Amino acid sequence: MSNLVSAEKITDYIPQRAPFVMVGDLLKRENNQAISQFYIGENNILVKDGEFTVSGLLENIAQTAAANAGYDCYLKNIPVPLGFIGAISKVSVQALPKAESRVETKIEVLQEIFGITLIKGEVTQNNQPIISCQMKIMIQKESEQ
């Protein structure tokens, strides 16, 4: 699968900056879905006791959604907006990935209304689900930035 956006360029599409970048390559976007992959380095600030934390996985899902929205803005030639996690629900954790490993994240936009985007996210490793959730993300309008 070829990358739409490489990990080296991902910060052009998301508002986060190091050391809080929790998404790597944006691999694919189609319909209301996007897929990213992320290499979890051992020095990542959300690695604890050699494992990527639930907080890190949730942030990875949110940043995959941000990369999807940022890529859409790039295609429309408009500025990338800020987004904030408003609510997280239906969290199901099966495992925590080890540091020095790679995960793949798929998000699906379920609904967009009044500046709120509802997504479903799932992170897998070696095709095995490790976490899933739904997330409401508030998008800040350009006039509010």
Image (spheres, grey):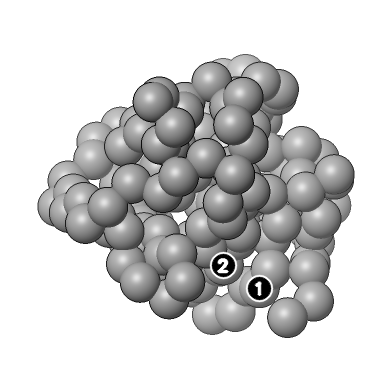
Amino acid type for the residue under numbered disc 1: Lys
* Residue 47 drawn above or below residue 96: above
Amino acid type for the residue under numbered disc 2: Ile
Q: Nearer the viewer, residue 29 or 2?
A: 2
Q: Residues within 10 Å of mark 2 (few under 14, many from 20)?
A: many
Q: Residues within 10 Å of mark 1 (few under 14, many from 20)?
A: some
Report the side of 68 relative to 50 (left or right): right
Task: Find the residue positioned furthest to the front.
Answer: 50
Residue under label 1 = 28
Label number found at residue 35 = 2
Assign a secondary structure to mark 2: strand
Assign a secondary structure to mark 1: strand
Report the side of 56 relative to 39 (left or right): left
Q: Residue at x 73, y 81 (%)?
A: 1
> Disc 2 versus disc 1: distance between alpha carbons?
5 Å
Mark 2 or mark 1, earlier in chain: 1
In this view of the protein, can residue 133 be seen by the observer?
Answer: no
Image location of residue 73, percent across then percent down? 72, 52
Image location of residue 13, percent across then percent down? 74, 44
